């Protein structure tokens, strides 16, 4: 009795095939191991890979190799470029902001017209001005004397003037009965940074004009 062959579950089949033809079809790839056969003496269709006479031949048939997904070796630079752009914008904005808020220290001009300068009388100092002396002690720390009284208007480290503390010390003179709105600042060997801090505290207290005697000298240190 010849062999019969059909695709798995197909109602149509090929008849009158020999064992050798089926084996040859498996080897050359025309017949799949999952195709079904009905051999001599078989009562039901069986897959070739499960048939007792054809299973060994089906195992010998090489299956096509699995496809391998080759990963690309190139790097995606988009994320790196985005991070670099964000950092660049951050540094540009930071630099621009630092330049905008930088405080310019006004230095005294040497081209002042001597004809416009006039001496200040002791009466004017007494009636209109608050007298403040700023100098360095033996340890090189700034000291402040307001109306011949030492005041504590320094920062916690004692190395610079605290504008807020100086403002609080000046308020009684500016807003008191005398209403003094000018200051005579005698600064000796102190830094321009200290002078600026004193000016900030004085303006915050309400001082409208600060006079610097000609004998005042400042240092670029600190």
Image (cartoon, rainbow, N blue to C red):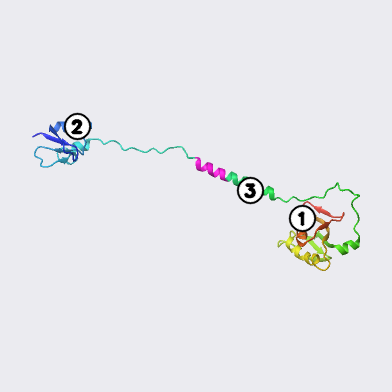
Residue ID for mark 2: 25
The magenta stretch is 77-86
* Local secondary structure at mark 1: helix
Residue 24 visible somewhere in the drawing: yes
Spatial CA distance of label 1 from label 2 is 101 Å
Is 154 colored magenta in this rendering?
Answer: no
Q: Are marks 1 and 2 in contact (CB under 8 Å)?
A: no
Q: Quadrant of residue 132?
A: bottom right
Which one is earlier in the sequence, the residue at label 2 or at label 3? 2
Distance from disc 3 to disc 1, alpha carbons, whole Å, reads 25 Å
* Residue 162 showing in the rendered view: no
Say which element carries label 2.
helix
Marks 2 and 3 sit apart, C-alpha to C-alpha, by 77 Å
What residue is shown with label 3? Answer: 94
Q: Residue at x 88, y 62 (%)?
A: 125
Q: Is residue 211 above or below residue 13?
A: below
Q: Quadrant of the N terminus?
A: top left
Q: Toward the viewer: 101 or 147? A: 101
Residue at 78% in and 53% down:
192
């Amino acid at each position: 009795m010849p062999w019969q062959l059909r695709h798995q579950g197909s109602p149509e089949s090929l008849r009158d095939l020999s064992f050798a033809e089926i084996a040859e079809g498996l080897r050359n790839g025309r017949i799949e191991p999952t195709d079904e056969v009905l051999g001599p003496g078989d009562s039901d269709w069986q897959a070739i890979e499960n048939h007792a006479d054809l299973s060994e031949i089906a195992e010998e048939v090489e299956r096509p190799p699995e496809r391998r997904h080759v990963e690309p070796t190139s790097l995606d630079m988009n994320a790196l470029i985005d991070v670099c752009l964000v950092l660049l914008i951050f540094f540009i904005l930071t630099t621009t902001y630092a330049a905008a808020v930088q405080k310019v220290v006004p230095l005294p001009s040497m081209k002042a017209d001597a004809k416009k300068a006039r001496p200040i009388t002791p009466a004017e100092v007494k009636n209109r001005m608050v007298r403040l002396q700023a100098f360095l002690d033996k340890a090189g720390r700034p000291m402040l004397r307001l109306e011949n009284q030492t005041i504590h208007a320094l920062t916690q480290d004692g190395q610079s003037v605290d504008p807020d503390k100086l403002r609080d010390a000046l308020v009684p003179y500016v807003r008191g009965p005398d209403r003094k709105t000018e200051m005579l600042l005698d600064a000796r060997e102190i830094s321009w940074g200290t002078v600026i801090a004193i000016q900030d505290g004085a303006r915050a207290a309400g001082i409208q004009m600060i006079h610097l005697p000609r004998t005042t000298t400042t240092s670029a240190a600190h």
